[in-house]
Image: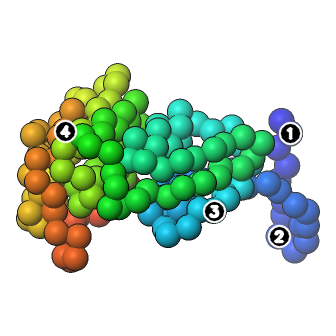
Amino acid sequence: METRIIKGGLTVSGTITAISSKSHLHRLIICACLANNGCKIEYEAELSKDIVATISCLEALGAIIKSGDGIIEVVKPIDKNNIPENPVLDCNESGSTARFMLPIVSVLCKGATLTGKGKLPERPFEQLCEALERMGAKFSSHKLPITIEEIANPQSFYEISGNVSSQY
């Protein structure tokens, strides 16, 4: 790779392809699965293990998702009135997946369990769990595996510190 120094007064033009934001893709897929209708999302990179984990968790909640050739298609969003009983959401090693999915399942699905692999079960979820518990949720633990014992009030205003994780 060649490095060049550009001195002031010069005009630079051209096109670059920006790296896709994995964090944005997580959020897009989750929002698509919570919407009333299916949709297609185009992406320009290979799906990371974290994105695959998020898709797997959403499928455990009843969504039907197809992916390939640069397109993720949410064929059937989550039916909030017909979620499978006691689903297990395997977050694999993805902290993003776990932190995005915990609030969703805590308002949707009593009996759902989030699991993980590698070092993810060692990571703390206290602040997120405590914020959800203030709204009525009850959890089996504040570390994975976490089972939702009581759901939170989905109509409440949630407040959580933003300096712990950008995923909050």
Amino acid at pointer 1: Glu
Q: Could you say whether the residue bearing mark 3 is in a helix, strand or loop?
A: strand
Mark 3 Cα shell of 10 Å, populated few (<14), some (14-19), many (≥20) = some
In percent of the image, x 25 and y 29: which residue is there?
A: 121
Q: Which of marks 3 and 1 is in front?
A: 3
Badge 2 is on which residue? 8
Badge 1 is on which residue? 2
In the rendered image, residue 151, in percent from the top left (x then y), is placed at 16, 58
Q: Nearer the viewer, residue 31 or 66?
A: 66
First in sequence: mark 3 vs mark 2? 2
In percent of the image, x 35 and y 22: which residue is there?
A: 118
Badge 4 is on which residue? 146
Q: Distance between the residues labelled 3 and 1?
A: 41 Å
- In the rendered image, the quadrant that contains the C terminus is bottom left
- In the rendered image, the quadrant that contains the N terminus is top right
Q: In this view, does 21 lie to the left or right of 163?
A: right
